[in-house]
Image (tube, coloured by chain):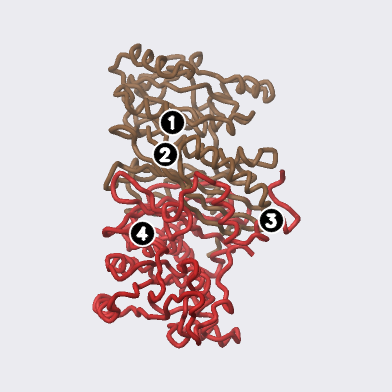
Chain colours: A brown, B red
Amino acid sequence: MRIFTPIRAESVVSLGEQRLITEIKRWLGAASPAAPFGIGDDCAVVPSSGKPMLITTDPVIYGQHFDDSVPARAVGAKLLKRNLSDIAAMGGKPVAAVVSLAIAADTSTQWLREFYLGLAAAAHTFKVKIVGGDVTQGPAGFFGAFLTLHGEAVGERVVTRGGAMPGDRIYVTGTLGGSLLGHHFKFTPRLAEGAWLARRSEVCAMMDVSDGLAKDLDSLTPKGLAPALCESAIPISAAARKCAVQTKQTPLFHALGDGEDYELLVVVCYRVDVVKFERAWARKFPRVRLTKIGTFAKRDEMPGGAVRLLDYSGYEHLR
Amino acid sequence: MRIFTPIRAESVVSLGEQRLITEIKRWLGAASPAAPFGIGDDCAVVPSSGKPMLITTDPVIYGQHFDDSVPARAVGAKLLKRNLSDIAAMGGKPVAAVVSLAIAADTSTQWLREFYLGLAAAAHTFKVKIVGGDVTQGPAGFFGAFLTLHGEAVGERVVTRGGAMPGDRIYVTGTLGGSLLGHHFKFTPRLAEGAWLARRSEVCAMMDVSDGLAKDLDSLTPKGLAPALCESAIPISAAARKCAVQTKQTPLFHALGDGEDYELLVVVCYRVDVVKFERAWARKFPRVRLTKIGTFAKRDEMPGGAVRLLDYSGYEHLR
């Protein structure tokens, strides 16, 4: 059997990312535990003799996640930060990372040095140790760095994607959209915010927004429910507005569809006093917006005027 | 700055693997702890709130580690087994793995299914859970699967590469060489053996042989010492003899230089009763050879007749 196929219907791209991941879980069978212990949340939660361990993995690949216009230090920093965002999304604390390189023989030593200096600076900022790795030669023109990050819960629990109920409120940190104008190399993973939110009993589910709100909200939405977003509440970034001028789309299109926001999507229980919760947030993080953008409703009880999320699509990893 | 360079002297290949790894440690600076807590042993040892955690990472890449002649299931199994061998080499027990895929859009779904079935079967055999991963589109013609494996110590300690003393004996499990004739997809990682050896107080250092004995022995050899191997003691595999016929090299050339043996190299303390140790091994593993192949000597006290290891070279990952 050949590894690559000329027939599109027989290739992974015809499946698309979501169905491919579903298939992979099926192929793995009993080797793949249910989320959050296995595939399907921001991090895998691995029971250990001490605190539960969090594991997540994300790469940066030349031509896919960056090109020649991006400084090497920014690429190295981003490799760590995109993984840190996953740890933040479960309320965890990062501990240690390993980096597996697959690089063409003609990779510039000077470029690679800058890449590692950027990685080291980010590791210093976020108190992560780079404890190991691997170097393998890749084909001509290829550079991929695959980082796996390990963390642990800060408080009593880790916050998963599951558990939203009808009436629960949906919040998001910061502003959304337009990351392609530069934010996706400059963002700060919301580690402090994620750790604080995980300690608040009001919070019942959480994830990071990495593929666009419209797509990512799906993963927070239990069967039978749907997110009812209020259009005027969505915190649209200045960059999304700039993008909209260039693309002739609406700013909302970019806020809901653009990937790489690296903000936190937070579900707050319908029973709690949100005024108290919002005040506590504002005291702790006076400079970071936390916006209520909607609620979860039963599919057959959707309020009128909710944003039609099907009109927006997020980032598709296989195309 | 460009990521790839046409000037060989400015590329990573001109540095070579060992110097590149040394440079990476330097670039990482304080973010890179000393081995065994950081880069430089079979696994990184990460202190945790429970037992110390072991982490290792190794990929399989199309065109580099396998080609169209290898069944997809064997590739999937090998991805896990080469990482398991690193856990075995420190006397650990594997727990959980994540897999990051970078694959061309035209990767065959059927091939990938077979790959995951092979991975799942190996995970079942060795009691590992596949807890997460990532799928990213890679360039045309590219398939890389990057696995990071987590384990923990079985007994009181993990066995590192450091600590050999003059007079210590060097042992190796199984037979060496000729893995290219097929062994490197069929091997069984020495997990049971590694765990048993880590519990024996006679054992003071250990590693797995993955790049060829001549190269790997370097990592076990403290400054000022050298391995004094006895040529006639080297357990040469039948495959190494077959290779030698084809290549017109000696069988010893293949036994010392070929990569991917995935056997254990074991250092036994000079003070102990080796007869008792060898008898205990033979009772526990009657079907696995454990051969004393030499001793560590001071550099200026090398016995006559020792194998000249400089005449042999192992597998170089960047060429």
- Whole-angstrom CA distance, mark 1 to mark 3, is 36 Å
Q: Amino acid at mark 2?
A: Pro
First in residue order: circle 4 vs circle 3: 3
Q: Nearer the viewer, mark 4 or mark 2?
A: 2
Q: Is residue A307 left or right of residue B276?
A: right
Q: Position of residue A206 (x, y in %)?
A: 39, 29
Same subunit, labels 1 and 3: the answer reads no
Residue A120 found in image quarter: top right
Q: Nearer the viewer, mark 4 or mark 3?
A: 3
Q: Amino acid at mark 1?
A: Leu
Residue positioned most to the front: B300
Q: Nearer the viewer, residue A219 or B33?
A: B33
| Dot label at residue B217 | none
Report the residue marked by disc 4.
B123
Give yes or no for contact between labels 4 and 3 (Cβ–Cβ under 8 Å). Answer: no
Same subunit, labels 2 and 1: the answer reads yes
Q: Position of residue B81 (x, y in %)?
A: 41, 63
The residue sitting at 67% across, 22% down in the picture is A248
In the rendered image, the vertical position of residue A203 relative to residue B252, given as above or below? above
Report the residue marked by disc 1.
A191
Q: Chain of mark 3?
A: B
- Whole-angstrom CA distance, mark 4 to mark 3, is 38 Å
Q: Chain of mark 4?
A: B
- Whole-angstrom CA distance, mark 2 to mark 3, is 33 Å
Q: Label 4: few (<14), some or many (≥20) within 10 Å?
A: many
- Whole-angstrom CA distance, mark 1 to mark 4, is 33 Å
Report the residue marked by disc 2.
A94
Q: Secondary structure at mark 1?
A: helix
First in residue order: circle 2 vs circle 1: 2
Report the residue marked by disc 3.
B11
Q: Label 3: few (<14), some or many (≥20) within 10 Å?
A: many
Q: Amino acid at mark 3?
A: Ser
